[in-house]
Image: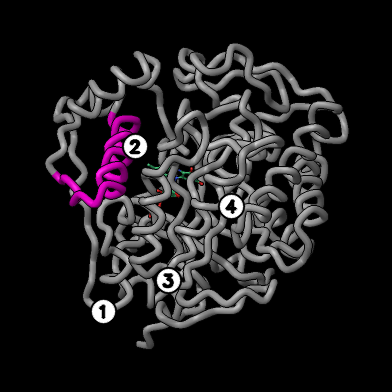
Amino acid sequence: MQNLLNQPLVLKNGTTIKNRLLKSAMSEQLAVDNKPSQTLINLYKIWANGGAGVLITGNVMIDKNALGAKDDVVLENGADLEPFSAWASAAKTNDTKVIMQLNHPGKQSPKFLSKTPVAPSALSLSNGLERLFNTPRELSISEIKELVRRFGQSAKLAKMAGFDGVQIHAAHGYLISQFLSPLHNQRADEYGGSLENRMRFLSQIYHTIRDEVGDDFIVALKLNSADFQKGGFSEEDSLKVAKFMADLGVDFIEISGGNYEAPAMLEGIKDSTKKREAYFLDYARKFRQICDTTLVITGGFRSQKAINNALNNGELDIVGVAKPFAFDKNFAQKMLKNPDYNCQINEPKFGIKKLDDMLLSAVIMYWYMEQMKRLSKNLDPNPKLSLWRVLFSSIYQNGLNAIKKVRA
Ligand SMILES: Cc1cc2nc3c(=O)[nH]c(=O)nc-3n(C[C@H](O)[C@H](O)[C@H](O)COP(=O)(O)O)c2cc1C
């Protein structure tokens, strides 16, 4: 089997990436005053030196008044671009390409940050999340247009700061994915109803960004294969959106899945897919039949063998990996060089069923964020880092509200 993982690839816009390993977005929550901090910049330098072809930043918000987490980075009009340029330049060390993920949380903005979040429709989250997230109000048409403009503005600023591209975050239940979902979007105007209407917000964002940044800048998309909710965004819808966006000209599409209510991106879909490592490969095969745009699949890949298998089978062009990057600064090097490499992380549990069911997925996110913080200081990961310690320090830093179901 060929080691395709190590081979370069030319993207649609002409950018050559040196290998097929992409660090997928992970919200680092390392901003200070919502600006990139030195700690964040150090982290990206370490990752760039590690050898991945592409680094996608954790989600950067396009509006300071709409945060997914307190310490998110925000890029909007009037921002001081200096820390952003330092961030881009650190991440571009070692011929690495860096792409800024742009996001708006919509109703997935916790109570302590948004008294009245916005969404396509005034429908609250379910599954107990309504206790942690306020019911949103419906966006007006003029507000939708303003948000489209903001995405374009943030992309333009990212380009000015030296990033190689932006990725539109249309996955995981945030605002764009709320528009795509018939469950969350029950509008009766041109932004709701048919799939054509539900994807209007996304396609307008794409056009506005492209107009601002031109054809030589990477504009990528992160899309759910489905949100795994009854009556929600289906695989059939997703394939149509992927094809539509590919025809518009996105440079690559990264496939993930799920949202806060049904977190498939972190937990996988079913046991058989977990065994085969990758969560979204079935989708990839269907995508390939209708679309020849560069495809990235993210979720569950841990061994070079499984990745090269998928690459050699033509199931994907680039592999996206997240958690292992938070856990080992040499992860990329090992993955690229060692055919037998298999990175399994023993994630801790509380060991108390009720607590694990209620809190584990949220606290594990903080556990990875703590590991990223250690990495940024050149410290080794701490596999024994206690979940209790993570729990108490997140409560200390963010108040009780921190123990929400954090997923990005
Ligand atoms: C700590 C943490 C933060 C995350 N933040 C984001 C984010 O900001 N944007 C995003 O698209 N996905 C985010 N994700 C999801 C990952 O990009 C990825 O889809 C998921 O972890 C599955 O990939 P993996 O199995 O290789 O970790 C985050 C995941 C983790 C663990």
Q: Where residue 211 sits: x, y (%)?
A: 82, 55
Q: Where residue 171 sits: x, y (%)?
A: 57, 44
Mark 1–mark 2 CB contact (< 8 Å): no
Q: Which residue is mark 1?
A: 339
Tell me the amino acid under the disc marked 1.
Pro
The first of marks 3 and 2 along the sequence is 3
The first of marks 3 and 4 along the sequence is 3
Q: Which residue is mark 3?
A: 94
* Disc 4 Cβ-to-ligand 1 distance below 8 Å: yes
Crowd rating for badge 1 (residues with CA inside 10 Å; few <14, some 14–19, many 20+):
few
Residue at the spot x=65%, y=31% of the render? 63
The first of marks 4 and 2 along the sequence is 4
Q: Which residues are magenta?
A: 360-383
Q: Is residue 375 above or below residue 145?
A: below
Q: Which residue is mark 2?
A: 365
Q: Which residue is mark 4?
A: 222
Q: Where residue 73 sits: x, y (%)?
A: 52, 37
Helix, strand or loop for the magenta stretch, by majority: helix
Residue 225 in sight in this render? no
SS assignment at label 3: helix
The first of marks 3 and 1 along the sequence is 3
Residue at the spot x=52%, y=36% of the render? 35
Q: Is residue 354 left or right of residue 42?
A: left
